[in-house]
């Protein structure tokens, strides 16, 4: 199932909410890592906490980037399908008009001959 992504009024994926959310999540991870680092006495544990925090923050960022990229691809795909349908309808309309014009021309030719 596709993840839900917020859109602006035109249906395009909105980047502001995901950016704010990721910013808050990264800030929370950083604050927790800072709090743990302050209260730990072992430099090895502090380094481990910092590394885990950095990896976690990057993972959060890439997860949201993936969702946003998928939303933009889906949006572009939908737009392309709509444009193809529109062009197809316009082609059919032109064909019908050409057929009608040909039939009128044939009738006019038939009446002038007869």
Image (tube, rainbow, N blue to C red):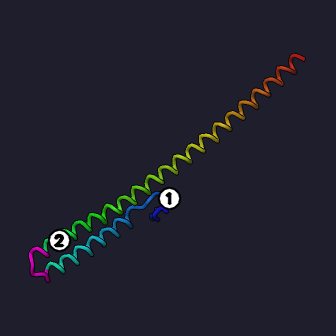
Residue 10 on image: x %, y %: 50, 58
Q: Nearer the viewer, residue 56 or 20?
A: 56
* Residue under label 1: 11
- What is the number of the mark on residue 50? 2
Q: Residues within 10 Å of mark 2 (few under 14, many from 20)?
A: some
Residue at 49% across, 63% down: 1
Residue at 25% across, 74% down: 29
Observer-side mark, 1 or 2, equals 2
Q: Nearer the viewer, residue 43 or 24?
A: 43
Horizontally, is 41 left or right of 17 in the view?
A: left
Residue 94 on image: x %, y %: 67, 34
- Asked which secondary structure carries label 2, the reply is helix
CA–CA distance in space, label 1 to label 2: 39 Å
Prevailing SS of the magenta stretch: helix
Horizontally, is 110 left or right of 79 in the view?
A: right
Q: Is residue 93 above or below residue 64?
A: above
- Per the rendered image, the range of residues in magenta is 38-45
Q: Is residue 30 above or below residue 58?
A: below
In the rendered image, which quarter is residue 23 located in?
bottom left
Q: Residues within 10 Å of mark 1 (few under 14, many from 20)?
A: few
Horizontally, is 74 left or right of 30 in the view?
A: right
Asked if the stretch drawn in magenta spans residue 43, the answer is: yes
- What is the number of the mark on residue 74? none
- Asked which secondary structure carries label 1, the reply is loop
- Lower position in the chain sequence, tag 1 or tag 2: 1
The quadrant of the rendering that contains the C terminus is top right
Residue 89 on image: x %, y %: 64, 42
């Amino acid at each position: 199932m596709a993840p839900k992504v917020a859109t602006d009024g035109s249906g395009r994926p909105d980047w502001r909410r995901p950016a704010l959310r990721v910013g808050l999540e990264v800030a929370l991870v950083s604050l927790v890592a800072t709090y743990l680092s302050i209260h730990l006495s072992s430099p090895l544990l502090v380094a481990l906490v910092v590394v885990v925090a950095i990896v976690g923050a990057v993972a959060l960022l890439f997860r949201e980037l993936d969702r946003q990229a998928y939303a933009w691809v889906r949006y572009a795909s939908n737009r392309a399908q709509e444009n193809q349908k529109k062009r197809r309808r316009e082609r059919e309309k032109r064909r019908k008009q050409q057929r009608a014009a040909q039939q009128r021309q044939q009738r006019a030719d038939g009446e002038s001959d007869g």
